[in-house]
Image (cartoon, rainbow, N blue to C red):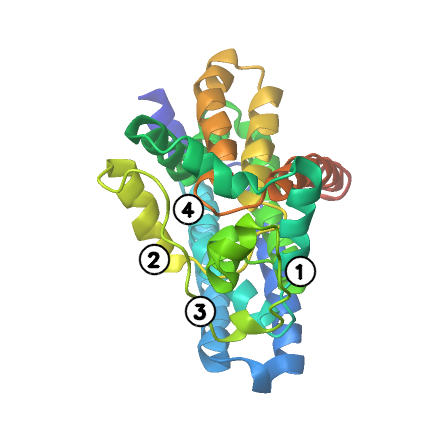
């Protein structure tokens, strides 16, 4: 009851301007809008992209107005949840931009071959193709957004004084990865293996396919037990929103690692213990389901530490307490 009352208790010193998280959204919006101006004639659907950005600006202003009228924790939460809910809308834009560049998958497949002497993504699913392993891997992959929700809500409920920083780091990390994906066109094994053929991959032959993905998006079927509940969830999510983009570094691994770092800072062992097995499954699953090369996972780990540290320092040095 006390928590419910606190949700709607009017704040004594409400924040007048935008939240740090909202500034990050507008900064990314402005950056991609500038890119659109230079690439407008090459984009497949620029009008929809423009109207979508306008709606986001209007939504941000409207939610700010509601908060100013009723400044409480609940309306603040609505502002943050609304922006996080739009992450899946922003994601396809990376493909709209990077399809104009030559694909680099042949390099990353070769990196895997050099480091591991094989293609881990290809062999992992072949060696462990049973129903139990398949469902565990798909469960891990499906836990990505639930883990984001768990950490975000934990800070909101139990570490509210750190909630602004945590939500800013989570959302802004996505935009940093999206910027990387715009200029680093790597589609991942599910697309590249299909494009060049599994026979070539098995022989260690990795052709340069240039701009193939500019107008092709066919992918290998997700490996595993096709009658599985979690397999079906992953397959439906892939069919609904996946594009030949965003392979290196793995944002699934990167963002989930950032979530683990944030969970560790809470010093709540129960939270860490609950998240840890799903985090491990998620990292493994990205390779198992052909979504990423093994080097993408390594890149996700390294980038997560760097991004989290930079955003943490930036927030503490430049953003007032929210």
The residue singled out by tag 4 in the image is: 78
Q: Are marks 1 and 3 in contact (CB under 8 Å)?
A: no
Q: Along the polypeptide, which appears first: circle 1 or circle 3? A: 3
Q: Secondary structure at mark 1?
A: loop
Outermost residue toward the bottom in this view = 41
Between residue 284 and residue 24, name the one nearer to us.
Answer: 284
The residue singled out by tag 3 in the image is: 55
Mark in front: 3 vs 4: 3
Q: CA distance from mark 3 to mark 4?
A: 16 Å
Q: Secondary structure at mark 2?
A: helix
Q: Are marks 3 and 2 in contact (CB under 8 Å)?
A: no
Depicted 215 relative to depicted 1: above or below: below
Q: Along the polypeptide, which appears first: circle 4 or circle 2? A: 4
Q: Secondary structure at mark 4?
A: helix
The residue singled out by tag 2 in the image is: 239
Mark in front: 4 vs 2: 2
């Amino acid at each position: 009851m006390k928590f419910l009352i606190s949700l709607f208790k009017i704040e004594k010193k409400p924040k007048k301007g935008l939240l740090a998280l909202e500034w990050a959204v507008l900064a990314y919006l402005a950056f991609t809008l500038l890119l659109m101006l230079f690439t407008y004639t090459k984009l497949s659907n620029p009008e929809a992209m423009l109207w979508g950005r306008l709606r986001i600006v209007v939504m941000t202003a409207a939610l700010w107005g509601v908060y100013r009228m009723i400044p409480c924790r609940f309306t603040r939460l609505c502002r943050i949840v609304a922006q996080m809910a739009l992450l899946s809308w922003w994601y396809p834009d990376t493909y709209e931009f990077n399809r104009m560049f030559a694909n680099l998958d042949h390099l990353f497949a070769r990196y895997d071959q050099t480091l591991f002497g094989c293609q881990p993504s290809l062999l992992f699913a072949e060696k462990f193709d049973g129903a139990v392993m398949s469902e565990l891997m798909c469960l891990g992959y499906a836990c990505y957004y639930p883990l984001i929700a768990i950490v975000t809500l934990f800070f909101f409920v139990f570490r509210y004084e750190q909630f602004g920083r945590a939500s800013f780091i989570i959302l802004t990390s996505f935009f940093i990865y999206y910027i990387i994906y715009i200029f680093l066109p790597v589609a991942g094994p599910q697309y590249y293996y299909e494009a060049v053929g599994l026979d070539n991959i098995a022989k260690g032959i990795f052709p340069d396919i240039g701009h193939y993905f500019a107008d092709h998006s066919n992918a290998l079927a997700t490996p595993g037990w096709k009658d599985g509940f979690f397999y079906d969830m992953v397959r439906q999510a892939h069919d609904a929103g996946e594009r030949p983009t965003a392979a290196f570094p793995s944002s699934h691994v990167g963002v989930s690692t950032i979530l683990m770092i944030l969970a560790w800072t809470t010093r709540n062992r129960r939270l860490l213990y609950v998240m840890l097995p799903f985090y491990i499954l998620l990292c493994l699953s990205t390779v198992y389901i052909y979504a990423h090369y093994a080097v993408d996972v390594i890149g996700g780990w390294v980038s997560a530490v760097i991004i989290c540290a930079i955003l943490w320092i930036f927030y503490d040095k430049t953003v007032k307490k929210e």
